[in-house]
Image (cartoon, grey):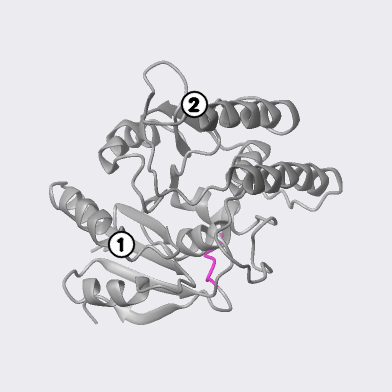
Amino acid sequence: MDKTPFLSIVIPAYNEAVRLPLTLNHILSYLAQQSYTAELLVIDDGSVDNTVTVLEEMIHQHQNIVVIKNQHRGKGYTVRTGMLAATGKFILFSDADLAVPIEELEKLLPYLASGYDIVIASREGQGACRIGEPYYRHIMGRVFNLIVRMFALGAFQDTQCGFKVFKRDAAQHIFSQVLLYGANMKQVKGPAVTGFDVELLFLAMKQGYKVKEVPIKWIYKAETKVNPIKDTWRNLMDIVRIRWYDLTGQYSVRNHVVTRVVPNSDEQVNPYRSGS
């Protein structure tokens, strides 16, 4: 019998000891109501608070939580770790604050069944709902998206929403090729909001994957780790790097030839796998 989970959910976590219990319990409660099988992977990004302790307590109570502990290398590298380790037929990554409620997944999954390889949540477009967002944040986001559309990706209204679901072969293929925050990423200091989403979508479009953008409900969280000035500058530099990597032929193009990728270096599943 095939024991492959229908769905894997990847949650990157950096200093999330306070929010994680509520987030994980909410996701687990939602999954318990579904007819499909699922696994939940939490990737710790070298947290210096009690995040790991909280996770160790939770996995003894729940059989489908997997914890992976990384050194602190940033969100892009952390998401990559989880996406390559996940075993589900479909793989979702979601921010730890659940700014996009997990229930919004129901709007995305049907598109995977209808032939799309990747479905991304969008805070823009008809039907999208942004709740509680400061006006300056919205303006900054729209300016950044304009730059993305001019220099990297013209097709998407929102590349940065942290709620994207992939078919497994697409996830394996794309995340194994990222260069911005890939296997050679060095350790960093403090939280780092980056343009890794842009690189993912750039590679997906370059290699012929079908991508669908779906308007969703998004709730602004006051505890966000976004630094408006520092992170905007970093994201802009990421766009420059993406274009440079492409122009210099550093992205390998292998049309959907996929092999199973095993996370390396510190990307190892730790002993704290629930049920073990």
Lateral position of residue 138 relative to residue 12, left or right: right
Residue sitting farthest toward the left: 33
- Per the model, the C-alpha gap separating discs 1 and 2 is 27 Å
Q: Decide if residue 73 is in sight here.
A: yes
Q: Is residue 236 above or below residue 18?
A: above
Q: Which element type, helix, strand or loop, lies under badge 2?
A: helix
As drawn, the residue found furthest toward the top would be 126
Does residue 165 appear to the left or right of 78 in the view shown?
Answer: left
Instruction: Rate crowding at label 1 as few (under 14), some (14 to 19) or many (20 or more) other CA atoms within 10 Å.
Output: few
Q: Is residue 255 visible?
A: no
Q: Quadrant of the N terminus?
A: bottom left
Q: Are marks 1 and 2 in contact (CB under 8 Å)?
A: no
In the rendered image, which quarter contains the C terminus? bottom left
Which residue is at the front of the view, 85 or 60?
A: 60
The stretch drawn in magenta includes residue 260? yes
Instruction: Name the mark on residue 135.
Output: 2
The secondary structure that dominates the magenta segment is: loop
The residue that label 1 is drawn on is 18
Query: In the rendered structure, which amino acid carries the disc numbered 2?
Result: Tyr
Q: Is residue 116 left or right of residue 41?
A: right
What is the span of residues highlighted in magenta in the rendered image?
259-263
Q: Judge whether residue 224 is colored magenta.
A: no
Q: Picture quarter containing residue 43?
A: bottom left
Q: Residues within 10 Å of mark 2 (few under 14, many from 20)?
A: few
Amino acid under disc 1: Val
> In the picture shown, does residue 176 fall above or below 98?
below
Q: Residue at x 16, y 72 (%)?
A: 61
Q: Position of residue 186 (x, y in %)?
A: 67, 70
Residue occupying the point 49% across, 26% down: 135
Taking the spot 33% from the left edge, 37% from the top edge, the residue there is 109
